[in-house]
Image: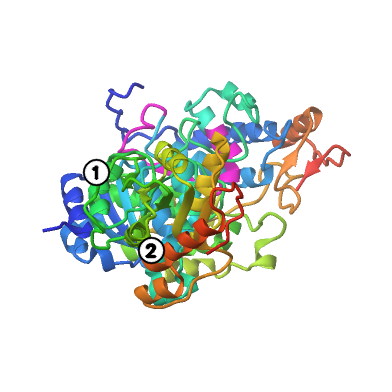
Amino acid sequence: MTATETPVAPSGQHLLELVELPPLALRVREHVLRMTLGGGCFVGASLSCADLLVHLYGRVLRVSPETLSSPDRDYLFLSKGHDVPALYATLAELGFMERSRLAQHLKTSDSLYWHPNRDMPGVEFHSGSLGHQLAVALGVALDIRLRQGTNRAFVILGDGELDEGSVWEAALVAGALGLENLVAVVDRNGFQANARTEELLPLEPLEDKFRAFGWACRSLDGHDFGALEGAFQEVPFAPGRPSALIARTLRGKGVPSLEGRVDRWFARYGGPEVEALIRELHGGPRADLTGDGLVVR
Amino acid sequence: MTVTYEQALGALAAAHEDIVVMTAENRAPIRGLPAALGPRFVDVGICEQTMLGAAAGLALRGRTPVVHALAAFLTMRAFEFVRTDVGIGRLPVKLVGYIPGVLSEANGPTHQALEDVALMRGIPGMQVFCPADESELVEALPVLCADRAPCYIRYNAAPPVSPHASGFAPGRAEVLGEGGRVSIFTYGFLVREALKAQTLLKAEGVPARVINLRMLKPIDEDAVLDSARAAELVVTLEDHFLVGGLHSIVAELFVRRGLLRPVLPIAFEERWFKPALLEDVLEFEGLEGGAIARRILRALALAPGKGESTWPMG
């Protein structure tokens, strides 16, 4: 798109039908598993987030490959930046970039590395340092309101990320400003890098915390597309308040041998291991991998 | 009638819809702006990090945020947001740091921004502007706001120090006087004390040139090199730590260009300064014109052109 072209405004249409989401989510998960090759990626974290991203881009966000520069688009900020494999996979499957580009992961000839950046089409801002993007999204939501726009700013946060005080500072400001076009989605998978959240820094009662900061807050199963559909249709959850959706998710979701494990936040696998994991993703036998070459954190 | 910073910013914002004024409860320099700007004035409360993140978000939407907070907290409490969101993002956010250096007066070391130049200049793409008085601040403001680079402004709204030799131009210093023996490089509030020292030195038969750098990044390298070569003694004068400020900038430039000159650094070395009212700080810390002149005379007397570079710290 040249600088002189007016950006195409998003239509009201969703990119996908609800029934198309589960097969898309499966393809996204396959891409995530393939990105564990070579240098590895944050596989467990990305798998918990995959359904949220699929649902948001397929059914909620008014943005498409044609409208990704429109000032009227909905914004998604991936504050939990290390989930970027799931974001890139979703964007690739929906045509924001070529699927083949995912094979450039970690190559110096392209810009696909362990956190998102604006060189990649569809990415709104670079992230990676936890606790930043709620404030950034707040600024975007504020400007939209200044311009009397109807578009929204969504932020995906990790639950471990909620340890960062800057998240709560931004929440305090957002609540005070009453930004009802701001929506935070928490990928509540119960894990942070090395521990369960509730064993390290317990977050519960989490809904109460958001409400205390002036937000309207709900919880649901973050892997249930029907529940997600219902919830996002009701955003903002309360007039004059920002909305927080606590999405209960499972780290490593979709691959039983990776699910719910503290030591599968980041992983690097070899070719045969990835194929075994993909077979397991599609209902095959457990790929309980314990090879010497396995690199996990 | 001189234009105040508040009036200048207000006029700029009235003429340019992209300007959004933000503050983390630092209202002193801009009390009239909330009423004047309405929704384009945002006070986030005592939330410097959120202010910077939100400024980045506003800038992504095409706004030019002008954010205000005390210099120490703007540059340190929110440093990561400045560097990561504004810096990496290369966004046109203007950061106005209030009461930097000695201007924090009796607040004490917690409020003393003596490393702000060091921190801000280290961010790729960040400009650093240090006005000597309100007239320079007002003159530069439209130019800086039009520039798409992020910029840190070491806020100083002191009364004009003297008729200025030249108008503001980015990356251009103001050279005051034609000195032979001494070149005093300085910026910000201490320009006025450097000019007092210049007058006293002249009375002692020591012509001195004062170079008001105005911008420390990008710095006027030609002015620095020309004035350094022309003098017997170079003085760097700043209300900043010795590490990372003007002295370091000058030293780095000399090394890059293979220039070796005797340099007398006047800065705070490994300590914070005595909290007091402004004029008392200057006197106590040897930063008023007379004390500066005496330090320069002593330095000249100790090693008249012998080429030794070990200068005493005043």
Furthest-right residue in this view: A292
User: Callout 1: 10 Å neighbours few (<14), some, many (20+)?
Assistant: few
| The residue stretch that appears in magenta | A65-90
- For this view, does A156 lie left or right of residue B270? left
> Considering the image in quadrants, where does the N terminus of chain B appear?
bottom left
| A255 to A158, vertically: above or below | above
Task: Tell me the amino acid under the disc marked 2.
Answer: Val
Residue visible at 26% across and 59% down in the picture: B161
- For this view, does B41 lie left or right of residue A296? left
The mark total stands at 2
For disc 2, the chain is: A
What's the coloring here? rainbow
Q: Is residue A290 magenta?
A: no
Is any part of residue A60 visible from this angle? Answer: no
The residue identified by callout 1 is B167
Q: Is residue A72 magenta?
A: yes
| A23 to B280, vertically: above or below | above
Q: Nearer the viewer, residue B29 or A12?
A: B29
Q: Nearer the viewer, residue B206 or B139?
A: B206
Query: Percent from the top left, x then y, of residue A227?
Result: 49, 51
Task: Tell me the amino acid under the disc marked 1.
Answer: Gly
Residue visible at 43% across and 60% down in the picture: B74
The mark lying in front, picked from 2 and 1, is 1
Rendering quarter of residue A196: bottom right
Q: Nearer the viewer, residue B287 or A291?
A: B287
Residue visible at 66% across and 56% down in the picture: A192
Query: Percent from the top left, x then y, of residue A194?
Result: 72, 56
Residue visible at 60% across and 44% down in the picture: A82
Q: Which mark is residue A173?
A: 2
Query: Percent from the top left, x then y, of residue A104?
Result: 62, 25
Query: Percent from the top left, x then y, of residue A188?
Result: 58, 56
Please, what secondary structure does the residue beneath circle 2 have? helix
